[in-house]
């Protein structure tokens, strides 16, 4: 019960139809309630606070909202012969005794005093294309055969304006939820339910289609993202990480976590499978750097001068290794050149060539070395 209260004090549950109720608590104050009915058997009633600066912190008369409000009401009267006539009635002097608002349906009770049996009017507005009905209340109204009645177009517009102002003021109280007064599941008090987990199972079942739809439209498979257009080429984005939700669920026993598997928050869930990309990600754009060719390092050592000079020599067949190359250079003794090199002749000197070998470096290639003696 406490966990449900914490949830309801901040949010409306999925598939909930809410009803705002404003009633007279005392001659100078009101009380407000927020009722909720879901499609899966849960009924709730919340207590709403009324701030001191709010309109309904004190007794409210109609003239505080609309000055000079007057409507035409049919009446039947006469001493010798009963006759029907249309008489104007000023509603400004009546106090707001109660208001009930459910979606587009609104009922307003106006009374002449705080007495429960005081005369007044009931205003009923129903439907998206509102149908307005006005009912006089009191002893004289009980004998009227044509009540309630539909006012003319001019009076309907006035009563709709009054309804909008009252419903707007009462609607502000939805943000001042104070306590959960009552909760029923399938008509029974939730405290007496033998298996409270039934409510969680039904709630998850109601949330699952929405969670799946959000996941399918989220760019990242690891997040649930909601977007709202603000106008002017601007939009607001709210997101939550699936990993954060899973971390909260890991505190539950394994049997309890199984209830939430339908949401697909883990990698093997239906949502996760649906959000995995069907095609591999595109290849990265080509690098702007010029291509490089595989080279080996050679150190030419002139024994006459004792100086070493680096020399880059292509090594056919060697895979591209980048710039991370290591080599070892070893000084060799002077050795006569044989074969074609001997025939070519040249100045004296010797060199040692250290050639790369395939191996492992930071790019999974390690350079080794081989030694060849050259003489001229």
Image (cartoon, rainbow, N blue to C red):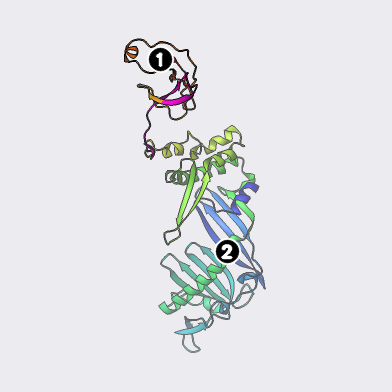
Q: Residue at x 49, y 19 (%)?
A: 329
Q: Which residue is mark 1?
A: 375
List x then y, in percent, for residue 62. 56, 77
- Using the image as rendered, state which of residue 89 and residue 202 is in the foreground: 202
List x then y, in percent, for residue 245. 56, 41
Q: Is residue 103 above or below residue 162?
A: above
Q: Please rate how many residues cluster around mark 1, counting C-alpha atoms within 10 Å: few if below 14, some from 14 to 19, many from 20.
A: some
List x then y, in percent, for residue 357. 43, 19
* Mark 1 and mark 2: Cα distance apart in space: 106 Å
Image quadrant where residue 213 sits? top left
Query: Is residue 5 highlighted in magenta?
Result: no
Query: Is residue 304 highlighted in magenta?
Result: yes
Q: Is residue 1 visible?
A: no
| The furthest residue to the bottom | 80
Residue 41's disc is: none
- Using the image as rendered, state which of residue 296 and residue 274 is in the foreground: 296
Chain part drawn in magenta: 287-311
Q: Is residue 263 visible?
A: yes
Q: Residue at x 45, y 26 (%)?
A: 310
User: Is 278 on the left-hand or right-hand side of 111?
Assistant: left
Q: Residue at x 54, y 60 (%)?
A: 19
Q: Is residue 33 above or below residue 195?
A: below
- Which quadrant would the C terminus be assigned to in this image? top left
Q: Is residue 204 above or below residue 137?
A: above
Q: Earlier in the sequence, mark 1 or mark 2?
A: 2
List x then y, in percent, for residue 349. 43, 17
Q: Secondary structure at mark 1?
A: strand
- Using the image as rendered, state which of residue 230 and residue 31 is in the foreground: 230
Q: Please rate how many residues cluster around mark 2, counting C-alpha atoms within 10 Å: few if below 14, some from 14 to 19, many from 20.
A: many
Residue 21's disc is: 2
């Amino acid at each position: 019960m406490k966990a449900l209260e914490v949830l309801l004090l901040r949010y409306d549950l999925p598939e909930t139809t809410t009803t705002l109720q404003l009633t007279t608590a005392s001659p100078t104050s009101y009380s407000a309630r927020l009722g909720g009915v879901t499609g899966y058997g849960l009924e709730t009633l919340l207590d709403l606070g009324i701030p001191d600066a709010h309109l309904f912190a004190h007794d409210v008369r109609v003239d505080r909202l609309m000055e000079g409000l007057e409507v035409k009401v049919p009446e039947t009267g006469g001493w010798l012969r009963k006759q029907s006539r249309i008489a104007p009635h000023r509603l400004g002097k009546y106090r707001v005794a109660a208001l009930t608002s459910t979606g587009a349906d609104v009922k307003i009770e106006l009374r002449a005093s705080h007495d429960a049996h005081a005369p007044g009017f009931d205003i009923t507005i129903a439907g998206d294309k509102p149908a307005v009905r006005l009912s006089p209340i009191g002893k004289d109204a009980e004998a009227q055969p044509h009540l309630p009645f539909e006012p003319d177009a001019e009076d309907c517009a006035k009563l709709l304006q009054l309804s909008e102002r009252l419903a707007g003021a009462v609607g502000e109280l939805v943000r001042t939820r104070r306590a959960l007064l009552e909760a029923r599941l399938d008509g029974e008090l939730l405290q007496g339910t033998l298996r409270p987990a039934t409510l969680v199972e039904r709630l998850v079942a109601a949330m699952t289609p929405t969670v799946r739809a959000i996941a399918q439209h989220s760019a990242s498979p690891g997040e649930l993202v909601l977007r709202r257009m603000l106008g002017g080429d601007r939009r607001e984005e709210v997101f939550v990480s699936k990993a954060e939700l899973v971390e909260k669920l890991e505190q539950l026993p394994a049997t309890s976590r199984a209830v939430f598997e339908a949401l697909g928050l883990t990698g093997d869930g239906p949502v996760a499978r649906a959000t995995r990309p069907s095609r591999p990600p595109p290849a990265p754009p080509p690098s702007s750097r010029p291509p490089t060719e595989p080279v080996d390092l050679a150190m030419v050592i002139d024994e006459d001068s004792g100086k070493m000079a680096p020399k880059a020599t292509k090594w056919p067949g060697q895979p591209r290794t980048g710039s991370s190359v290591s080599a070892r250079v070893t000084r060799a003794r002077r050795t006569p050149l044989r074969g074609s090199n001997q025939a070519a002749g040249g100045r004296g000197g010797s060199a040692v060539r250290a050639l790369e070998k395939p191996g492992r470096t930071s790019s999974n290639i390690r350079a080794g070395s081989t030694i060849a003696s050259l003489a001229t």
